[in-house]
Amino acid sequence: MDRPCFKICRSIENHVPPKVNEFDDTDVEPEAYETNNTMLEAFYDSCVELDTSDLSSLCDFVESFVNDLLEECRKALPYQNTLPLMENCIGVDSAFEGWHTQKLSKPFAVLVPLLPPKGHSFQIESSDSEGGPSKHGHILVEMECVCKRERLLGDVVCFLHHPEQELSEDKQGAFLLHVLCTSSHLDAEKTVHWFQSMVGKAWNNLHHKYNLELTPQPSSTTCRLKLAFPSGRSILVDIILGVQQGDSLVFLVSHYGKSDGAKGTIWLKTFAIQELLFFKWVSQRAPERSCHLKCLQILIYFKESSPSSKNPVLTSYHYKTCLMHLLLLRPLSDWGPENIATRLQEILLYLHTALRKKYLEHFLIGNISLPIQIPMPQVLRSAEPLNLFEHLAVDPNLHAEAMKESMEVVERVRALCSEHDK
């Protein structure tokens, strides 16, 4: 009789669509479950795990460090500032969602919301209002009349009604529309370059406070920093700039995930905050020592260490999307630590089925089952689901490569089970 890890692997390898009731594996002996669970836990502890307290401490440090940099950046802005304002950062992605691993060099990502300076406004231009979710958008910069505030408080100049030459250069500094915009739209690459320069100057004023070495890394879409500690350990930090779309917690950002990043005036749309809130929502309701993050970490570990990891078609986000769907399809009580082997194979099965159909729904867009606690604009909740595998449906070569990458992970899981039997 097959063990749980073998059962799904053989179904996938033989291209036989597994039945839904195979999730339950009621015909498998309890001893087989326990053996596979023990094997997976041991592998996780030795190869994958990043100590939870260590990860939490690193996340706290990264946010505190970036906020210190931001405070120095704010101090450097001129009195009559016409450049974007920076709010405190928000930790996003794998580290702050809890599935970072010790073997991977993935950066700690933080999102820095940008606000318009006084006398200006940011207007988001996106096709969402037309009924179809878009993957990107533009940020129109408009000037607003603040003559009344200028007369009453004197802390701002109405740029709309003052020719530029009348403004004091030492107070005003660089003019937003000229420095960071292209055709009245905020330019992502120009904005990132400006911010990188600000961070470099901020570190010159801050380095005495920290016992570490900071080295900027080349990037046109994010401010990537390498932090090297006296212990010899080093981490990467991605500071991602973004503008919030109204009060929706949807952001247009300069960079996200494995994408090519924003180009010119085209910014990328991200739901990173909603995904972060979803994982927090799950952690508050799942059993103690829930296995959902461990399952994802093990699969990402195998994916990143497979022969196809250089330029993969399947990304961590695809695996994460499968997990998020399953967390709503099954009761959270089923994700206890004793079910790690079964839940792991379910994620593989869900991905395999999506690959066969060349159809994987975006977790948030068009998901009517999304908990009400996760804020999403109604137009996106009710939109047609977005297919993350649309590119595979039109390119047979990409689809074949994705299937191959999936099988490499399946084989790694099976090999792990086989090795334990020897």
Image (spheres, rainbow, N blue to C red):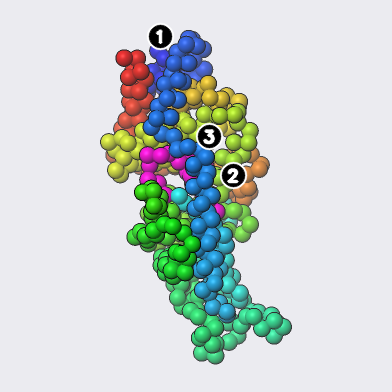
How far across and how far down the image is residue 244, in percent?
A: 57, 59
Q: Nearer the viewer, residue 105 or 163?
A: 105
Query: Residue 417 colored magenta?
Result: no
Image check: 133 left or right of 217? Answer: right
Q: Residue at x 42, y 21 (%)?
A: 39
Comparing labels 2 and 3, the label whose residue is closer to the camera: 2
Query: Which type of secondary structure does the marked residue at label 2 adopt?
Result: helix
Q: Position of residue 239 (x, y in %)?
A: 46, 57
Question: Where 89 falls versus 282 (above or below)?
Answer: below
Q: Earlier in the sequence, mark 2 or mark 3?
A: 2
Quote the CA–CA distance across marks 1 and 3. 29 Å
Count neighbours of disc 3 (C-alpha within 10 A) and say few if under 14, some if 14 to 19, many if 20 or more. many
Q: Which residue appears at 72% of the width and 83% of the height? A: 152
Residue 262 seen: no
Disc 2 designates what residue? 277
- Secondary structure at badge 1 equals loop
**Callouts 2 and 3 close, C-beta under 8 Å:** no
Seen in the picture, residue 234 relative to 31 is either above or below; the reply is below
* Amino acid residing under circle 3: His
Q: Residues within 10 Å of mark 2 (few under 14, many from 20)?
A: some
Is residue 357 toward the left or the right of residue 309 in the image? right
Q: Which residue is mark 3?
A: 325
Quadrant where the image shows the C terminus: top left
Q: Nearer the viewer, residue 364 or 320?
A: 320
Between residue 171 and residue 277, name the one nearer to us. 171
- Disc 1 residue type (three-letter): Met
Q: Is residue 247 left or right of residue 227?
A: right
Please, which residue is most extreme toward the right here?
152
Per the rendered image, the range of residues in magenta is 90-107
Residue under label 1, please give it: 1
Task: Tell me the element at label 3.
Answer: helix
